[in-house]
Amino acid sequence: MSLLTTLARLEAVRAGVAQPLATVRHRHVSERPFALVPLAAAGETGAPLAMLLGSDREHPRLLTVPQPLDRDLRFAFLARLGDELLPYLESFGGDVELLERNVKDPESGEKTVEVRELCADAPQLIVPNPGGVELLGLFGRSTRFRRTAEDPDPGPYPAPARVPLLGRWLTHLSERANVPGSSMLLPLTSTLARHWATGQSSLEDAHLGALLAWIAPPEGSRGEQAASRAENGRDERGQLLVPPAGPATDPDFDSLLLAPAVTRYDAARSAQDEPLTRARAEEIEALLRSVLLPVWHQVWQGIDLLRELPPAAHVVERWEGDRWSYTGHRDRVAAGEPPQPLHDDAVTAARKLAQREREQVRVDLEEALDDPLAMAEHRLAGQAFAGEVVEVQPDYDTSGRSPKPRPLVTVRTEDRPHLDPGGEVHRAGGPSTQRAELAWLDAEAGLLTLRLLSGMGRKKEPEPGSVPEQGEQVCFTLFELSARQSAPLPDPEDTPWTHGGPPQ
Amino acid sequence: MSTHPSPAAAPTPGEQADAAVAAILASALHGGERGTVVDSPPGAGKSTLVVRAARELVATGERLMIVAQTNSQVDDLVDRLAQADAGLAVGRLHGSDALPSEIATRHAGVVASTKAADLRELPVVVATAAKWQWVRDTDPWHHAIVDEAYQMRSDALLAVARLFERALFVGDPGQLDPFSIVGTDDWAGLHHDPSQSAVVTLLAHNPGIVPHRLPVSWRLPASAAPLISDAFYPFTPFRAGTESGDRLLGLGPATPPPPAGLAPGLARAADEVLDVAAESGWGLLELPARLTVRTDPEAVAAVAAVVARLLARGGEARSERGTAPVDAERIAVGTAHRDQAAAVRAALAALGVTGVTVDTANRLQGREYDVTVVLHPLSGRPDATAFHLETGRLCVLASRHRHACVVVTRAGIPELLDAHPATEPVQLGVVSKFPDGWEANHAVLEHLRRHRVPVG
Amino acid sequence: MNHSTHPRVDQPLTPLEARLAALRGDAAARSMDARALAALAANPGCDRRAVLDAAGVDKASLAARLGSPAAFGQSPFAITRGLVFERRLRADRCAELVALLRSELLPEASAQTPVEVPDLLPSEGPAVRAARTRVALSEAAAAASAGRAWTLLDRPLLRLDVAGSSVSLEPDAIVVGPDGRWTVVEIKSFPILDGSADPTKVGAAARQAAVYVLALRATASALDAAAPSAVRPAGASGAGKPGSPYVEPEGLAGAVRTTGLLVCPRDFSNVAVAAPLDLRKQLAVTRRQLVRMTRIETLLAALPETARLDEAPEAVDALAHAYTPDCLAACELSFHCRTQARAAGAVETLGRGVRGELGSLTTVEAALAATGEGEALARAARLREEALAR
């Protein structure tokens, strides 16, 4: 954690309410998000227990598994999840924009124009926390390889027809969630925690109820009390006042309410009493609805909170990355490609890592450019400085054939960049990318004189507006303001001997 | 160095090292495996080995490419190659925004270019892994040498391996591991985890490759090699190439008055710890226990004081290489964080000291000095973190010196370590890196306590 | 759950044991179970935890009596699932476990070697069980060196000295192979999915297994002393130099392998799968931790002689706590300590890392006061204010 975040947390303790960590919203929030609150069956790996879901906050759909050990009931759940979710996911596939780009044929060197489709929008799934993302990933892992009755060899336990397709989408979405800055599958707790600092630790922020209690404490209550109630408060039956946001259920809920209900359901079922079995299943549904509904409201409260923040300037551009990701998967499904493999081969793993690192650098840079609070982190760390231009002196580089503008700009700042004369800096928020180097500095007076090196056009005199003027506020960073391109990697079939050769 | 091992007596360090080098060269040239791996502890002659192997590989008439990790490593290597063989044409391939240093380009035989095509007919071409990754449309080189291979990531090797048929990988497994700014759990346990060291991937996929080892440190004095070997290389021990009497650090008398700005008490303690270090090879300058911010002004002042007194007293280093003054160029200060390095630089400047290298562990990797002054990574901290406990960090800081190392710290680190949670996650199937950082920190401190000088 | 009663008949209590027993009151002593070991790992510097664990106090019920119950319940579904998994492995004199261990640990040549699964008297008290385990180990070593059989010790009980007080440890199983090497086996209910498992849980299992290896070495040394064995089992190698924390001990203690075996359900099924755990790092760390631990007698000095936690639970507050938010995941008493830490305004309540940022400022109040003037915090406050004003 940085000192600025620590300071915000200290202020939150004093204020009794969470403090802003961002002045803008750094993640895309869709106009039509799809919320999912999944619960897992305790003790079973990736086994669903229940889920409240939908894009209509007033009318959530409830799916349950009355006996989580029953394979058929689990598949019935997943099939219904597919029925609810796949139409939403697929609804974004039809509306596309056509983009042209020039490509050079690697063999002939001939240039042609390629037209590609980009879906105009993409789905957005919102879950309470990273555990929800992980559980959806596990659903994806457990279903994408399933054979169905439509397969030539359906096996002993064929899954319902669209279950493997659901598995492939969930796998894609949960992988995408690992790409920094992506918003296609958003865990709410970490997204909220990016924007608000509470007066508790980040470990405690992982509890959605406690986090919201700090961000929006009920009238007359302080964050600490409200969070404590959300964590621990129990009613006269010993049940939590604020049920956990999953995917794990409260053990006391399991032992006092759910387990007896499941036992009654099993009894009715083994007695082959269908009406009673249905009634027992409805009891379980009612129980699960009672612990899911409060979380459902929390999720939408969290979405509302995020929507109140103005979107950061680069959010739309990053969302385009999600649209590409969605479009790509849509195309792979349409092309009948097989499900994602269990493990990435060497080249795929390296490509994914490169993408994630590139996107991490990019999101850090963009957040700094979009949000003065994010830039403040770099200023405090001595990696950027901001201040007022106090003097501008025209100067030229006359070493070449034609003179080039190299004006000297003196900035007064209270920041203390780790910068020595000759060091390179980059202008943030200028009209175009612009490099400069430190010509000299007067650390005592906080005066830095920079020589601008680029971004002023090709003529002898700088383009109008390209050089900051006296009195203007400017900001420079010691780091480059764009992510570097990743190096090319071989095709998987050309995997070298150092990495085991081509995958079998 | 003797090249005639006598069967009766135990081999001398020189004989041991020669035998190791001979086996390495035989494997690189004619071994049955396409890869040869050499583990080299600090100062074990890795650079010498690389230069020698380069010349022998070139002598076979094949073209050689060399991969290093940073531009300064590349420049260093080019310089060494050119010095070893003035007649050798060496290509220095570089990026358009990273011009080669003068130490490389000053040699007549060195050709620098941003394009591989300009250099491909030269017997040797040297570049960073980052630059090699972009080279395409070329026939593979027959031989490659990959330097600092433990600091190279597996994905970087994946991008360059198409450029060569056989390769010699050389590096120090005890230094800092490569890292990623994003989570890499998705690939943990896979042989080709792109975030792990290139050598780990190579060995996992090529079980026939048995790493060679350079068994003798020519840098570390006899006072340091056993400690560093035990604490950081428990399964691959090495020895010092010199005996305890071979290296002498002579200091002038502590009589010249300390300059203004240096507290007399601190100056006295600095003098005392320098005497201890000159005598024993190690010194621990210990400030009273206190929780501080990272740039603890008193600890920074103490580091600066040690350096200033060392320079003021005029040290002289006598070794198998002869006798030379310990001037600013032969002294380095090591820290864990960049802001600490910046604070030490400022403190030194205030005392009028210039020319001393002050840098973080990451940047001191592969460097060598006569005397080092280290600000202990845990000094003044309320708690340790995985970063501060990383084995390689302490190993780099404690193994840069030929004569003596002075560590400056707040008291109380053993207690801090005791209270540190042992909750390191473990990934199935991942070969764990040895030794443990927590344990190594304790072991080093236990040793340093014998050379302790308290301040105030 | 590992409730057990210390025997009071077969050996007199040491003064320390008597003091700890009095502190515990009428409550039964708990073994150093997985949770206690995890709490130790998470916060080795906490005096309060050290004393409570040494005394075998049930921290969950203590927390409840203090009005800050822990949130460490386990779902009946998870318990059932774990029990089903273990029961299957152990059914029929551990037939399934034996088969798995045979294929994982034994060379093919020993496929025909019979296995012994001795009765370790699981319903007896700890002293009897510990004695029985020692005898069984010694018999197993003899059987192995005679080439007669390999042995699976199911739920043995080991004793280990922790900070000057002896605690009970219950590994899931120990295998004494035909080569004479001893292996600690840990059975866990978390899955190994596509070859990997939750690294936090694997790490905890490895640290737990390392404690068992140390206890096993101590037991082996005691057996050695009782009947010095001239044979050092084959395969034990003295890696590392003498004095190195990674060196394997001499004698029978060297028979204990530094690689443990983790047994878990595979993927989404209930079928068991095994994975080796390299314990060398955890061993080196745990060994030094145990050596350096403050002795319980010293810590007890903070408590009045007459303190009884079953009657007056608040006496626990005389022991210093070292709360950090990480405790919430590991210690039953964490809510209680958190309340105290918050009341004191300790900056640790905001996270372990916060202390490193704030240096000598240890309270929220002091830190906020420092935003007015001074170095980093004041600059941070100025930057924050400037950014929020836009």
Image (cartoon, coloured by chain):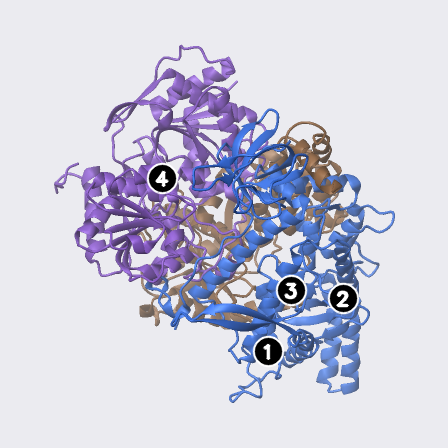
Q: Which chain is blue in the rendering? A: A
Q: Is mark 2 on a helix, strand or loop?
A: helix
The residue identified by callout 3 is A185
What is the distance, in whole Å, between disc 4 and disc 1 at their CAs?
56 Å
Residue drawn at 68 percent across, 47 percent down = C333
Which residue was labeled with disc 1?
A165
| Residue that badge 2 annotates | A292
Q: Colour of chain B?
A: purple
Residue drawn 52% across and 41% down? A453
Report helix, strand or loop for mark 1.
Answer: helix
Is the residue marked by circle 4 packed among few (<14), some (14-19), or many (20+) residues within 10 Å? some
Chain in brown, by letter, is C
Label 2 and label 3: CA atoms lie apart by 19 Å
In the rendered image, residue A268, in percent from the top left (x then y), is placed at 75, 82
Q: Look at the image and tell me whether residue C208 can be seen.
A: yes
Image position of B148 with respect to B137: above or below: above
Task: Assign the C terminus of chain A to one quadrant of the image.
Answer: bottom left
Q: Name the residue under label 4.
A: B101
Hey, what amino acid is under mark 2? Answer: Leu
